[in-house]
Amino acid sequence: MMLFQETSLLVLAGGESSRMGYPKHLLPVCGGTMIDNIVNNLGHFFSEVIIAGRDLELNRTDVKVVEDIRLRRCPLIGILSGMRESNNPNVFVMGCDMPFVKPEMIQFLISRKNDKTDIVIPIVRGYFEPLCAVYSCSTSDRISHYLNTGCRKVTGIFRTMSVMEIPEYEVRSFDPLLESFINLNTPNEYRNYNLS
């Protein structure tokens, strides 16, 4: 079994789930919850699994649950919170509403990370995918400073980072249908994929 070296799995579960109307990380999936599905499918590839959010109710002992360190809700706060608790120099960041992320694609992104690169991020359909990317934990101070200025957009931090962009054609060689980037935001999307 492959183990992704020097990288923790960081799952963000701190969103408001306003469009879903129910905490997305607790949605029923395959006899468990969305979080259970992600951890069961991907967790064994990592030496550490971190779930970041606010007031999370998780009945698992094989993950590290991290409370968001700031009151505002945004992905970057979840990323920073997880980084600060990681025992590894890197984190692979994904959302809790992404049930189809492929381990082969994760392995490929991690393999592209080096000491001179802060972030490895796919570009899919012309857009960055910041919640399916590898981040260096050494960037936490820069992220904290960026948040202190009142900014919250994840891609806004890229100006101060060394970013390796992975083009779509490379991603497709590991995930031809780009299923890794499907996220479930609404009840219709959840029902359409029939995960329960």
Image (tube, rainbow, N blue to C red):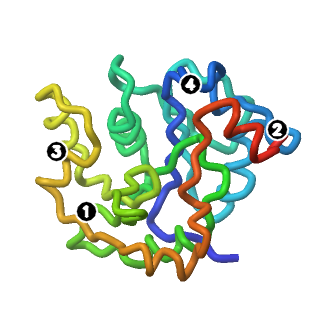
Residue 152 position (above or below residue 120): above
Left or right of 85 in this view: 65: right
Residue labelled with disc 1? 118
Q: Position of residue 40 (x, y in %)?
A: 74, 52
Q: Position of residue 167 (x, y in %)?
A: 36, 74
Q: Residue at x 27, y 70 (%)?
A: 164
Q: Which mark is residue 137?
A: none
Q: Could you say which is closer to the camera, residue 132 or residue 40?
A: 132
Marks 3 and 4, the one that precedes in the sequence: 4
Q: Position of residue 41 (x, y in %)?
A: 72, 57
Q: Residue at x 56, y 33 (%)?
A: 65
Residue labelled with disc 4? 19
Q: Determine whether the residue tagged by mark 2 lies in a helix, strand or loop.
A: strand
Q: Amino acid at mark 1?
A: Asp
Residue labelled with disc 3? 142
Q: Are marks 2 and 4 in contact (CB under 8 Å)?
A: no
- Could you say which quadrant of the image residue 196 lies in? top right
Marks 4 and 1, the one that precedes in the sequence: 4
Q: CA distance from mark 3 to mark 4?
A: 31 Å
Q: Amino acid at mark 3?
A: Arg
Q: Amino acid at mark 2?
A: Gly
Q: Nearer the viewer, mark 2 or mark 3?
A: 2
Q: CA distance from mark 2 to mark 4?
A: 21 Å
Q: Amino acid at mark 4?
A: Arg
Marks 3 and 1, the one that precedes in the sequence: 1
Q: Nearer the viewer, mark 3 or mark 4?
A: 4
- Could you say which quadrant of the image residue 58 lies in? top right
Q: Are marks 2 and 3 in contact (CB under 8 Å)?
A: no
Residue labelled with disc 2? 32
Q: Position of residue 75 (x, y in %)?
A: 39, 36
Q: Quadrant of the N terminus?
A: bottom right
